[in-house]
Every structure is written in C-alpha cells, then in structure tokens.
C-alpha cells in the first residue's frame, strides 16, 4: 500500500485545519461569493500544505504525489466545493509546470511565495472560445525587445479576483497549434490586466471565478516557464496532476454525503417507518458506497503508478471521468432521499448537488476524458484538429508530448531538491 | 528548561466501540494521542519557545503507542522515550507511575506535564501518583501557565473546587493540563516528516531495573473484570408545528410525564 503513518498524520492535520479554519466560515464565504484566499493560504503555507510535492529549495517538502492525493482526499471534508477547487488551483494546477520547468529566478519570485501562502496563483488556460479545446486558444504574447506583449482574454479563472499571478498559456508564434504556445507568469497587478467581472455560477460560490482581459500587457521574456513553444506540452503534463487531484477530491466527499444521507433518512419517518428502511433507499446507498470505493481504488492505483514514474494519463482520465459522473449520481440520488429538505437552498446536500456539477466540466470535460480513453483504446476516429488528434501533416501531438516529457532531463514527479 | 510530557495512545472514542463477551472488540479500532496530552504537549512547547530547553515525550505501551509518540514528535517534541514491554500491559495507574518515575529519574528535569486524565480510562490518577513517587509538588487541572519561571518557581492558574486558584509552584514540579489551557497546534507537514528522524529511546522493564512482578497485570491492585457497552440512548421525540403549540406540548409532557414540577 502507498500510504504510511506519515500520510495518516498529514490527513489528521488537514482534518484539524478544515475543522478549525475552513468549515466554520463556509456559510459566510458562500454568501460573499469569495473566500479570503490570502488569509487561508498563509495558514496552510505555515503547515507546509501548499508545497507537498514542490522542491525543498523553494520551501516545499519534496514528497511524492501520494501525499498530494492523501491531501486532496482529505479536502473532501470541506463542506463546499469552491474552497477545495481554489486550493487545488494553487497546489496542483497553476504551480506544477513552474516548479518543474521554471528557471531559478522565476521560481524564487513566484513559486516560493506561493508555497509559503503569501501569493495566490491562478491558471489562465480556458478562454471564451477555447475551453476543453485548449489548442484553439487565441490569446497572444508577441515578442517586443526583451518583453512579451500580451493581448487577449481568459475565462472561468478560479482565484482570479484575488490572485497575485497567473500561469498563462498563450500563443507565442504562428506555428502549428501544439507548438506555438508558451506558459508565461503574468503578475496580475501589471498594467493592462483587467479583471472584467466576477462570474455568477451554478455552484462553487465560495470561490471567485472571473473573466480577465489583457490589453498590451508587458512582461519580461524571463517570465516564460521553460522553453518557448513547449507550453501546450507542459500544460498537458500539468493536467495529469490536475486530473489525479480532481479524482482524489471525490471519494471522501461522496462518502460523507452518503453517511449524512443515512443519518437523515434513518431519523425521518414516513408511512410508519424510517425512509432508510425502504429497500430502494438502503440498496441505492449501498450501491453508491460501493461505487465510491471503486473510484477510490482506481485513484490509488493511478497514484501508485504515477509515483513509480509511469505515464498515467489513461488511469487519471478514467478516474477524473468517474469522479465527475459519480459525484453527479451520488448528489442527485441522495438529494432525492432528502425530499423537500434536499431541495432547500441551505441544505448541505443541495449545495453539494450544485457544486458537484462542475466535476464533469472543469479540468477537461467528461467528453475530453472519454476522447483520451478512446485514444488509448485505439478507437478514436481521426479528426482534422483538436487536443488528441494531430493537424494534417503533423505527428501525433499527445504521443509526441509524452515522449518529450519522458526524455526530458527533469526531476521525477515529486523529487526533492 | 528540561520538560517531560507524558503521552498515551488511546482508542478513538469518536468511533463506535463494540463490546463482545465482556471485551472491547479490537478490530477496526483507531488509536489516537489522548486529547489532554495534546494540551500538555502544547504547554511544554510554549514554555520551550518562551525560553529555551528541551521537550521529551514519554509513553508506556505496546507498538502502537509509538505512533502517539511520533505524533508528539511531529508536533514539536525533541525526543521520545517508549517503554515497550509486554509485562507492563495491564498496569494500573500506580504501575504506570512507577515505570514513568524510573524513566524520568534517569536525568535531571524541571517540569513534568501530563493530561489531567486519559481519554480512555478517565482515571486522572497517574499524574498525582507520579508526583508522589518523584517527590515533587503537584498542581492538577491547570488552565494557565506563565511561561517565564522566576526564582525557580512557576506561576500558574488551576481550576479548583470553588474557583480559579493562583499558584506559585516550585520547580521541579508536576502539572496536569485542563483542555482550556491552550489550543494544541496542528503538526506541520515538515514536523511530520521530521518525526522519524528524531531520537527515540525504546526501553524494556529490565532496562529500567523494574521487577516485572511489581507492575503490569501481575502488580496491579485492580482487575478489570469485564467491559459493558454504554446503555443505548432512547430515541428522542420530535415536535412539529407552531412554536406556541410546541411549547404547550413540551410543558404538558414535562409536567405530566416527567413530573419535573411535582
């Protein structure tokens, strides 16, 4: 088994932190549609929770990804979906590429304070016209002297209203769509960065999500993460951790919702017996609990292989797909058993139902996961463009990217420094 | 200041404990560091941080007690002592105190801090017995410690029978911690990973020169005959309707059924 006493202890600390510093404030944050990321992250940073797999020389712990998975799973105790997402953006979505490919000066300036919790980061990939189809994004970063001049905009940016910096994916040339992009660190206070509006969402209210415009934003070329033109490859790699993280957040959240539903239906009486005593109810809950355990097993298996240095794009995609779908199934079926109470806005299950919907959309929609899985199965028909099929005359980008990643002389996932 | 903190690994009572044939079912139990011990440790760490010194966590127990000890190290204790000897199993508070006294007397110490009771047996006796064996003054149920000792004395507050007592206690001394003494810190991930690298002494009774017959089940003055599950709480009654109507129903039941006004 991948988990040790230290993992258990980490879970204990995360549990304690959530009980003391997060859950008591969730109602207030949901109401405010934002949570104080700087304040919460600073405290998490002090406990070492924002740099679990990050290099030691930037304040991280240099541990393997199994610790991140234990951490992500325990975040499932948070009684809303927005805060775990915001934390995940900081730890596993906007920082992995910087930690792995960013130069020393760039890491000192942006990674170290993000691990300490002084800086809040966000990820700029999705655009109005490019969500899951990352390759088609339109934001450009044009070279001018020693700078990049950035124009365009990003959409659905988690943490965007309070972030200090963005890990931006932009087109840095006119070449083929998988080779013309770079990841660039953009300080959010830079002139021309316009946070247009805080977006109103179906769920995840505690977390601020914004639309952002860039109007001739100037950043030095030294803010580029790694090599020019490798942005798409780095981002695909970054997605691997994002997907494992998204899957790992699932099992405990769902397990706890099932337990709360058991508690509620046991007490609630109708037609002379408890709701729970109806076979359709306890059979359904038993089956959902079984599915949660399947998700957990798949996530752990993918983690184990990832820690061993293998490419787990397939399993991580399967786990992310399952997590998204199962979250919808569990919250929908449980809400049904809560009846009128479940339909009330303030009930825990109704919030979970709204928040869970994101799982099948964010971080690569279910359909993207299915395409990846199909691709690995060899059953995806050839299409002219997209994340998983090459442009005409181009080699297969995903495979090529994987090869490049495996060949690159970089530390193994989670290796210390 | 050289501070000793007594820690104990106990069953997590938040989980359901099952009793079968007079014995606690051991399967599926989770063991944790007794909560008052966390207060004791936090107090020791604060004292250390306010001045200087060293915090040693001590436990008596089987292998799993090592986990409680490592948790104490993760939270910030500098070293650990684990008395791990099957002959110590079944000790009463007197037996445990005898073992602890031998451990503590190996070196000079300024202060011993324990939880006011352990979370499993709720006995609260080990600390006072140990103070007697060590021949040091005792204050139980401590709620505040002035972190600066003056003239070899420590100013503390404890919750007594009739109110809060302000006490000046001469060092070396033994204190037991109330849970309002402090808010125990969470172990940082750095502390967690460092715990295994900190020194930990593992001792047997013979290392301490203790005759096994005088401690453990053999030397115990009490014998636990059997465990019984706590009585099931009867189902509550739920009232629905308008507040006025509910109030009327409740008053009626209190008066006529519970007869509390009789």
Image (cartoon, rainbow, N blue to C red):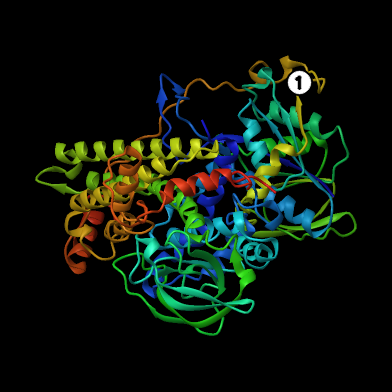
Residue B168, position in %: x, y? 80, 57
Residue A294, position in %: x, y? 34, 36
Q: Is residue B64 visible?
A: yes
Determine the residue positioned at 26% across, 48% down: A330
- In the displayed structure, would residue B146 be above or below residue A256? below
Picture quadrant of residue B71: top right
- In the displayed structure, would residue A197 be above or below residue A406? below
Determine the residue positioned at 64% across, 59% down: A46
Furthest toward the front, the residue is A393
**Subunit under mark 1:** B
Q: Nearer the viewer, residue A272 or A55?
A: A55
Q: Which residue is mark 1?
A: B205
Residue A243 is left or right of residue B160, and the answer is left
Q: Is residue A260 visible?
A: no
Determine the residue positioned at 70% across, 41% down: B195
Determine the residue positioned at 81% across, 23% down: B208
Furthest toward the left, the residue is A271
Residue B208 is left or right of residue A17, and the answer is right
Q: Nearer the viewer, residue B30 or A301?
A: A301
Residue B25, position in %: x, y? 44, 24
């Amino acid at each position: 088994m991948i988990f040790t006493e230290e993992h258990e202890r980490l879970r204990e600390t995360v549990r304690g932190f959530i009980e003391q510093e997060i859950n008591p404030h969730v109602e207030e944050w949901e109401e405010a549609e934002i949570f104080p990321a700087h304040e919460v992250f600073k405290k998490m940073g002090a406990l070492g929770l924002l740099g679990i797999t990050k290099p030691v020389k930037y304040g991280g712990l240099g541990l393997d990804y199994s610790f991140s998975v234990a951490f992500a799973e325990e975040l499932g105790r948070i009684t809303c979906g927005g805060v775990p997402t915001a934390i995940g953006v900081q730890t596993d979505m906007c920082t992995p590429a910087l930690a792995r490919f960013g130069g020393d000066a760039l890491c000192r300036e942006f990674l170290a304070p993000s691990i300490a919790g002084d800086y809040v980061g966000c990820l700029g990939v999705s655009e109005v016209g490019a969500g899951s189809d990352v390759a088609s994004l339109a934001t450009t970063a044009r070279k001018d002297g020693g700078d990049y001049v950035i124009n365009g905009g990003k959409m659905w940016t988690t943490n965007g209203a309070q972030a200090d910096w963005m890990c931006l994916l932009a087109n840095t040339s006119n070449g083929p769509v998988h080779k013309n992009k770079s990841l660039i660190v953009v300080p959010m206070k830079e002139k021309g960065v316009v946070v247009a509006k805080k977006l109103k969402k179906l769920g995840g209210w505690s977390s601020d999500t914004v639309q952002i415009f860039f109007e001739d934003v100037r950043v030095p070329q030294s803010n580029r993460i790694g090599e020019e033109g490798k942005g798409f490859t780095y981002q695909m790699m970054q997605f691997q951790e994002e997907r494992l993280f998204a899957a790992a957040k699932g099992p405990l959240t769902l397990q706890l919702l099932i337990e709360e539903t058991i508690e509620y239906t046991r007490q609630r009486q109708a037609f002379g017996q408890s709701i729970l005593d109806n076979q359709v109810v306890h059979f359904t809950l038993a089956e959902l609990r079984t599915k949660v355990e399947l998700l957990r097993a798949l996530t752990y298996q993918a983690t184990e292989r990832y820690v061993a240095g293998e490419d787990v794009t397939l399993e991580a995609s399967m786990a992310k797909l399952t997590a998204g779908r199962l979250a919808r199934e569990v919250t929908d079926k449980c809400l049904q058993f809560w009846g009128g109470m479940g339909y009330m806005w303030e009930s825990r299950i109704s919030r979970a139902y709204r928040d869970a919907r994101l799982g099948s959309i964010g971080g690569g929609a279910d359909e993207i996961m299915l395409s990846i899985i199909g691709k690995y199965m060899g059953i995806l028909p050839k299409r002219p463009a997209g994340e998983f099929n090459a442009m005409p005359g181009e080699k297969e980008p995903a495979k090529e990217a994987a090869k490049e990643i495996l060949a690159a002389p970089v530390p193994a996932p989670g290796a210390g420094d | 200041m050289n501070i000793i903190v007594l820690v104990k690994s106990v069953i997590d009572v938040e989980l359901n404990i099952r009793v079968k044939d007079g014995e606690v079912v051991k399967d599926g139990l989770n063991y944790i560091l007794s909560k008052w011990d966390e207060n004791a440790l936090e107090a020791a760490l604060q004292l250390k941080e306010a001045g200087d010194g060293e915090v040693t966590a001590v436990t008596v127990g089987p292998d799993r007690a090592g986990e409680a000890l490592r948790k104490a190290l993760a939270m910030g204790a500098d070293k650990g002592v684990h008395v791990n000897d099957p002959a110590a199993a079944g000790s009463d508070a007197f037996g445990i105190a005898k073992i602890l006294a031998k451990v503590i007397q190996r070196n000079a110490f300024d202060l011993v801090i324990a939880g006011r009771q352990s979370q499993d047996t709720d006995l609260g006796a080990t600390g006072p017995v140990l103070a007697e064996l060590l021949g040091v003054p005792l204050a139980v149920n401590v709620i505040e410690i002035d972190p600066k000792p003056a003239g070899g004395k420590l100013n503390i507050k404890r919750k007594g029978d009739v109110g809060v007592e302000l006490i000046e206690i001469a060092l070396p001394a033994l204190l037991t911690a109330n849970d309002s003494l402090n808010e125990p810190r969470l172990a940082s991930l750095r502390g967690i990973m460092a715990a295994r690298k900190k020194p930990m002494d593992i001792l047997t009774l013979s290392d301490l020169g203790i005759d096994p017959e005088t401690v453990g089940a053999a030397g115990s003055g009490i014998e636990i005959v059997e465990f019984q599950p706590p009585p099931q709480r009867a189902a509550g009654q739920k009232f629905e309707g308008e507040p006025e109507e509910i109030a009327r129903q409740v008053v009626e039941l209190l008066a006529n059924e519970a007869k509390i006004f009789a």
